[in-house]
Amino acid sequence: MPGRIHIAESRTLVSTILGSCVSVTLFDTALHWGTINHFQLPFGNHEPERSACFGNVAIEQQIATMVTQGTHLRDVEAKIFGGACMHSRGSRRSMGDQNIDVARELLERHGIAVVAEDVGGDRGRRLVFDTGTGDVWIKRL
């Protein structure tokens, strides 16, 4: 669901549907477990809004949780999905583009390699993430 983060305690298949929203998967290649978020907006600036609906909050929460569980960031691989432009672009950058940008910027800041992405365009996606292998399957909608 939008605004949620799934932290795997055991191998799980997690499914979500994305339009302009973005999901970032993080997979620990040494410990073989992963996490996925689903965020709607790039930034939340007010304390009451610090929820996983915002990319800056969701990604930081994912990373912090992985580190507290014993993950070394050098072992983490990221994948980014979604960020479609679901409406006319006009003269402004689409919300999908802004969501993609925040994901890329935060992952780079933490030194986490992005090993795959399927982003942008004008069609939604159905995503399935295997938290035990890091594999992701995408179906364009």
Image (cartoon, rainbow, N blue to C red):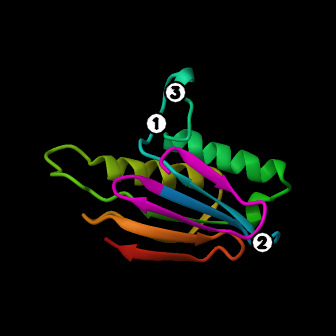
Which residue lies at the image location 77% right of the left edge and 72% below the top edge?
Answer: 32
Which residue lies at the image location 44% right of the left edge and 42% below the top edge?
Answer: 42
Residue receiving disc 2: 32
Residue receiving disc 3: 49
Which residue lies at the image location 75% right of the left edge and 48% below the top edge?
Answer: 65
Local crowd size for mark 1, using a 10 Å CA cut-off: few (<14), some (14–19), many (≥20) = some
Residue 21 counted in the magenta span: yes
Q: Amino acid at mark 1?
A: Phe
Q: Is residue 21 left or right of residue 66?
A: left
Q: Is residue 84 left or right of residue 110?
A: left
Local crowd size for mark 2, using a 10 Å CA cut-off: few (<14), some (14–19), many (≥20) = some
Q: Amino acid at mark 3?
A: Glu
User: Residue 52 at what x, y percent from top left?
Assistant: 55, 41
Q: Is residue 118 visible?
A: no
Q: Quadrant of residue 51?
A: top right
> Which of marks 2 and 1 precedes in the sequence?
2
Residue receiving disc 1: 43
Could you tell me which quadrant the C terminus lies in?
bottom left
Which residue lies at the image location 55% right of the left edge and 22% below the top edge?
Answer: 48
Q: Quadrant of residue 17?
A: bottom left
User: Residue 140 at what x, y percent from top left?
Assistant: 34, 74
User: Residue 91 at what x, y percent from top left?
Assistant: 15, 44
Give, as a single range, the part of the protein colored magenta.
Answer: 1-22
Q: Quadrant of residue 77?
A: bottom right
From mark 3 to mark 2, how far is it between C-alphas? 32 Å
**Mark 1 or 2: the one toward you:** 2
